[in-house]
Amino acid sequence: MFLTVEQRILVTLLEREPLQNNEIARRVGITQEHCCRVIRFLAEEGLVASEFHAPRRVNRLSPAGRKIAGHIQEIKNMSANLIRK
């Protein structure tokens, strides 16, 4: 199933949070710079909370982000099951 970068980041955080930008970028397969821009966008949309815990910044899903990521994960799983049949 094809997911946007934003959707892949939300699902990645759903599967394992909190994560730093560099870890998200590695898991999603994008540059750290691109990841920072997308995380900032998702935070502005209220889907991700970015917090500073010395010495690093970590990201978590907001309640709204968790709900949307859950729906994306469900669709991803249903799609994978259809492909297998």
Image (cartoon, rainbow, N blue to C red):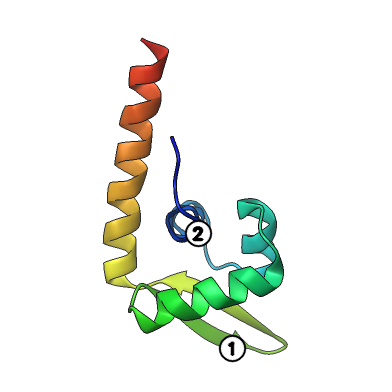
- Please name the amino acid that badge 1 sits on: Phe
Residue 68 left/right relative to 40: left
Determine crowd level at label 2: few under 14, some 14-19, many 20+ residues with C-alpha closer than 10 A: many
Q: Which residue is identified by label 2? A: 9
Which tag, 2 or 1, sits closer to the chain's start?
A: 2
Q: Quadrant of residue 58?
A: bottom right
Residue 82 position within the rendered picture, expressed as x and y whole percent measured from the top left: 33, 19
Find residue 60 and name its label. none
Place of residue 37 in the rendered image (x, y in percent of width and height, measured from the top left): 56, 77
Quick one: 66 or 78, which is closer to the camera? 78
What residue appears at the point 27 percent right and 49 percent down from the top-left corner?
71
Front in this rendered view, residue 6 or 18: 6
Q: Residues within 10 Å of mark 1 (few under 14, many from 20)?
A: few
| Label drawn at residue 52 | 1
Q: Secondary structure at mark 2?
A: helix
Instruction: Note whether 41 is above or below 26 in the view shown.
Output: below
